[in-house]
Image (cartoon, rainbow, N blue to C red):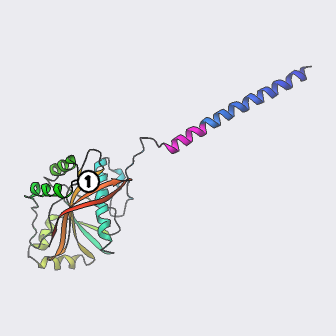
C-alpha cells in the first residue's frame, strides 16, 4: 500500500521539478538573448586602437574627448598613407594652424582664424554652430600632442624648437631634416579638434609639407557614422 502511494508522489515531484527547471532555463535564455541584442549602456562605444611600441595605450586615457581627437587624427593620417606608402611621417608635437615654411619659427599664432572660419562656414554649411564655436575657442592656444596615433605609417613626433633649428638657415632646412630622418615623407601638423555636443561632428585644420614648394593645408569637416570618422568636406586649401 505504501509503495502504491509513494510511486505517484515520486512521479508528481519529478514532473514539478522538471517544469521548474524548464522555466528557469527559458527565463535565463531570454535574458541572455536580451543582453546580446541590447548591450549595456555602460559599455563604451569608443574605439580604442591597440598600443604600439612607441605609444601608450589610448584606452588608459580617461578623457573621451581625447580619445575622439586621436581617432580624428588617425582618420586623416590613414587618408595620407593612401598616397604616402611606407616610410615615416613627422608630426609637430603641438597643435597649430598653418604650413611648416622655410622660415619656420616657434611662434605659430594665427591672426586670420576668425576670417577663415567665416569662409569655412560658408563653404561647408553642414557644420553646426557649436562645432565652430568649440573649434574657435580651443584653437586659440596650442595644445600638446603625444605619440598616441594609430596609423600604418611610422610616426615621429617632433618639437617646435627642433624644427626651428632645422629651418633657421632657410630652405637648406629641408635637406638637413631629411638627412636626419631619411625615411620621412614630410611634416604633418594638426590643430585642436572642435566637436559638437554629441561628438559626432568634428572640425580640424591639418597640413602636410614635404618641401619649400611641396605642401598643402585645409580645414577638414568630419562626421562620425557607424562609429567611424569620415571626411565630409574641406575648405580654404592652402598650397605651397
Tag 1 secondary structure: strand
> Quick one: which residue is furthest to the right in this view?
1
Q: Position of residue 124 (x, y in %)?
A: 21, 57
Q: Residue at 29% of width from left, 60% of height from top? A: 231
Q: Main secondary structure of the magenta part?
A: helix
Residue 32 lies in magenta, yes or no? yes
Q: Nearer the viewer, residue 182 or 83?
A: 83
Q: Residue at 79% of width from left, 26% of height from top? A: 12
Residue 33 lies in magenta, yes or no? yes
Q: Position of residue 18 (x, y in %)?
A: 73, 33
Picture quadrant of residue 91: bottom left
Q: Nearer the viewer, residue 164 or 28?
A: 28
Determine whether 8 is above or below 40 in the image. above
Q: Position of residue 41 (x, y in %)?
A: 42, 41
Q: Which residues are magenta?
A: 28-41
Residue holding disc 1: 202
Q: Nearer the viewer, residue 69 or 120?
A: 120
Q: Position of residue 70 (x, y in %)?
A: 29, 57
> Quick one: which residue is furthest to the top in this view?
1
Picture quadrant of residue 10: top right
The answer to whether 61 appears left or right of 220 in the picture is right
How would you rate the neighbour count of disc 1 (Cα within 10 Å): few for under 14, some for 14-19, many for 20 or more? many
Determine whether 64 is above or below 81 in the image. above
The answer to whether 51 appears left or right of 201 in the picture is right
Amino acid at each position: 500500500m505504501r509503495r502504491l502511494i509513494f510511486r505517484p508522489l515520486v512521479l508528481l515531484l519529478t514532473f514539478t521539478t522538471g517544469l521548474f527547471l524548464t522555466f528557469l532555463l527559458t527565463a535565463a535564455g531570454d535574458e541572455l538573448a536580451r543582453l546580446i541584442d541590447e548591450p549595456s549602456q555602460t559599455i563604451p562605444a569608443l574605439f580604442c586602437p591597440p598600443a604600439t611600441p612607441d605609444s601608450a595605450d589610448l584606452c588608459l586615457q580617461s578623457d573621451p574627448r581625447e580619445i575622439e581627437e586621436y581617432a580624428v587624427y588617425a582618420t586623416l593620417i590613414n587618408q595620407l598613407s593612401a598616397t604616402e606608402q611606407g616610410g615615416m611621417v613627422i608630426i609637430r608635437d603641438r597643435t597649430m594652424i598653418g604650413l611648416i615654411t622655410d622660415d619656420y619659427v616657434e611662434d605659430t599664432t594665427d591672426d586670420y582664424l576668425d576670417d577663415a572660419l567665416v569662409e569655412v562656414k560658408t563653404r561647408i554649411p553642414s557644420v553646426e554652430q557649436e562645432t565652430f564655436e568649440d573649434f574657435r575657442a580651443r584653437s586659440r592656444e596650442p595644445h600638446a600632442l603625444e605619440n598616441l596615433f594609430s596609423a600604418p605609417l611610422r610616426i615621429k613626433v617632433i618639437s617646435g624648437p627642433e624644427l626651428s633649428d632645422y629651418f633657421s638657415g632657410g630652405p637648406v632646412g629641408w635637406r638637413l631634416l631629411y638627412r636626419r630622418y631619411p625615411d620621412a615623407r614630410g611634416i604633418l601638423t594638426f590643430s585642436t579638434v572642435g566637436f559638437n555636443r554629441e561628438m559626432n561632428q568634428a572640425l580640424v585644420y591639418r597640413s602636410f609639407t614635404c618641401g619649400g614648394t611641396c605642401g598643402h593645408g585645409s580645414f577638414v569637416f568630419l562626421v562620425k557614422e557607424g562609429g567611424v570618422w569620415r571626411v565630409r568636406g574641406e575648405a580654404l586649401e592652402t598650397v605651397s
